[in-house]
Amino acid sequence: MNLFLTIITCGIYAAWAKVRTRQYFYANTTIAGHPFDYLANPVNILKGHLIVGALFICYLVTEQFSPEWAFVLIGLFYMVFPFLAYKSIQFYTHNSAHRNIRFTFKGTLKQSYQLFLLKPLVIPLTLGLYFPRWIYQRKKWVFGHSGFGSTMNEFSASSKVFYKAYIFASIQFILIFAIPLCIMIAFVFMTGGMPSSQSIKNPQMLSMASLSILASYTGVILAGAVSQQYIFSTITNHCWNSSRLGHVFINSRLKTGRLVFIQVTNILAILFSLGLMMPWAKIRRTRYILESLSIETGQSLDEFTAGNQEEVTAVGDAAVDFFDFEIGL
């Protein structure tokens, strides 16, 4: 329904679709029997979409008639992106609530510019070795400056876990990809080199070539899925298990194998249904992630109190969604 209404309104309904989707997921996620609430105003999100859409159109027009100025606009966007990231997280947390108490984010704009403008420049200078550290700092910025009402989260994660996750995931990728690679090498040796046009006409050789190519693609997809979900489960578990919200301890028990199975079967379901199973796939993955979370507390959740918060604009949230960047938890 959201997709249909968005198409027939030329994208205007996208703001309402976004709010409806989040409200649906929030309303069906509960702690101690109480659901979450998403309180954003679709009109504000629509204004953000219109502003970002207008800027994007300006970029496309500039690229057509004056390509050199298009690079200037890209540079300007890079300069503005930390502001959009900061506003996006602030907007998202401000409009998320539980038992009539809003979540909050106390990170600063200066920290956002350091994190998204300056520190990424270090990654190529260190040949990528700084990347796990940068991911850790992103998580620390979000988790360490988020709160519920007037209670701020305490975050004690270690960057060592991030490095171990990326190193081990890289090893997993190499080992899994080595299997189809060996099949390809064996096929080349069996055919006495790269297959020629004459050998490909042979049905048996054609079958072997097809199977080796299929095994290679399957190996790449499987290796990527295992590595990606291992990193996600390891880092997510570590971040949540290293968080404490006042007297509440948070536990996460995600399993890599289960996440890989969900991802692979979701992809197959989406492909064979021509995209119709995408909502089912999204809910299935989200359900597993949320059902793997639990909290431990020796006191009542009623002791949390609301804090004073100022209204925030939806421009940052709309911009990040428009360009499909992953900023949050």
Image (spheres, grey):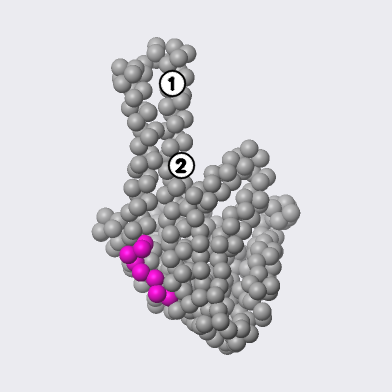
Q: Is residue 259 left or right of residue 68?
A: right
Type of amino acid under label 1: Met
> Dividing the picture into quarters, in which one does residue 315 lie?
bottom right
Q: Is residue 155 left or right of residue 251?
A: left
- The magenta span reads 155-162
Q: Which mark is residue 6?
A: none
In which quadrant of the rendered image does the N terminus lie? bottom right
Q: Nearer the viewer, residue 295 or 314?
A: 295
Relative to 273, residue 72 above or below: below
Give me the residue at 63% from left, 37% from top: 272
Question: Residue 13 magenta-drawn?
Answer: no
Dot 2 or dot 1: first in sequence order is 1
Q: Nearer the viewer, residue 82 or 33?
A: 33
Q: Is residue 235 visible?
A: yes
Type of amino acid under label 2: Leu
Separation (CA) of disc 2 from disc 1: 21 Å
Q: Which residue is mark 2?
A: 222
**Few, some or many C-alpha atoms within 10 Å of disc 2 (few <14, some 14-19, many ≥20)?**
some
Give me the residue at 43% from left, 72% from top: 242
**Few, some or many C-alpha atoms within 10 Å of disc 1 (few <14, some 14-19, many ≥20)?**
some
Q: Position of residue 123 (x, y in %)?
A: 30, 60
Element class at badge 2? helix
Q: Position of residue 180 (x, y in %)?
A: 39, 33
Q: Nearer the viewer, residue 300 or 129?
A: 300
Element class at badge 1? helix
Question: Residue 160 magenta-drawn?
Answer: yes
Give me the residue at 66% from left, 79% from top: 99
Q: Is residue 82 visible?
A: no
Q: Position of residue 93 (x, y in %)?
A: 56, 74
Q: Which residue is mark 1?
A: 208
Give me the residue at 58% from left, 54% from top: 285
